Amino acid sequence: MSRLFNRLPGHPRTPAGRERQILRMLPKALLIGTALLALPSLAVRGAALFNPLLGAGSLVMSVDIYSVSLVVLHWTVVFTVGLSAFIVMVMKGPAYVADAYPLSDADTPAGDKP
C-alpha cells in the first residue's frame, strides 16, 4: 500500500491557513445558527399558548415554514463552506508522484503506423 502514495521529493509543504480555522468554527456555527433560526418558530408557538387567536390562524404554520426553510438554507451554506475549506486543506497537502504507465506504442504513435 505504501507504493501507491509516493510523495514528490523536494515539494514544499504549504502552512495551514484560514481553512483550518474555518473548519474548527463550523460545528459551533451550525449549532448556534440553527438555534437562532429556530427561535422565531418557538416564540410564536409560545405566544400561541397564551393567546388562542394566534394558534387558530395560519401565522404559526407560516413562521414554521419560514424557519424550516432558513434552517435548511443555513445547513446547506455551512456544508458548502466546510466542503470548500476541506478541499483547500487537501490541496495544500503534500504532492504525490504519479505511477508510470508504459505505453504499448511509445516509439511510434498509433496514428503514424503504415
Image (cartoon, rainbow, N blue to C red):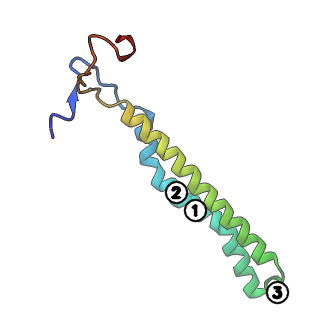
Mark 3 to mark 2: distance in Å? 32 Å
User: Which of the image's four quarters has the C terminus?
Assistant: top left
Q: Residue furthest left?
A: 2
Q: Is residue 18 above or below residue 60?
A: above
Query: Compared to 110, does 70 lie above or below?
Result: below
Residue 30: which disc? 2
Q: State the SS at label 2.
A: helix
Q: Position of residue 9 (x, y in %)?
A: 20, 19
Q: Position of residue 86 (x, y in %)?
A: 42, 41
Q: Residues within 10 Å of mark 2 (few under 14, many from 20)?
A: some
Q: Are marks 2 and 1 in contact (CB under 8 Å)?
A: yes
In percent of width and height, residue 55 lies at 78, 85
Q: Quadrant of residue 34?
A: bottom right
Which residue position holds label 1? 34
Q: Residues within 10 Å of mark 1 (few under 14, many from 20)?
A: some
Q: Which residue is mark 3?
A: 56
Callout 3 touching callout 1 (CB < 8 Å)? no
Specify the amino acid type for callout 3. Answer: Ala
Task: Identify which amino acid the numbered label 1 is placed on.
Answer: Thr
Residue type at the position of mark 2 = Leu
| Distance in Å between CA atoms under marks 3 and 1 | 26 Å
Q: Is residue 69 left or right of residue 60?
A: left
Tell me how far mark 2 sits from mark 1, CA to CA.
6 Å
Q: Is residue 55 left or right of residue 81?
A: right
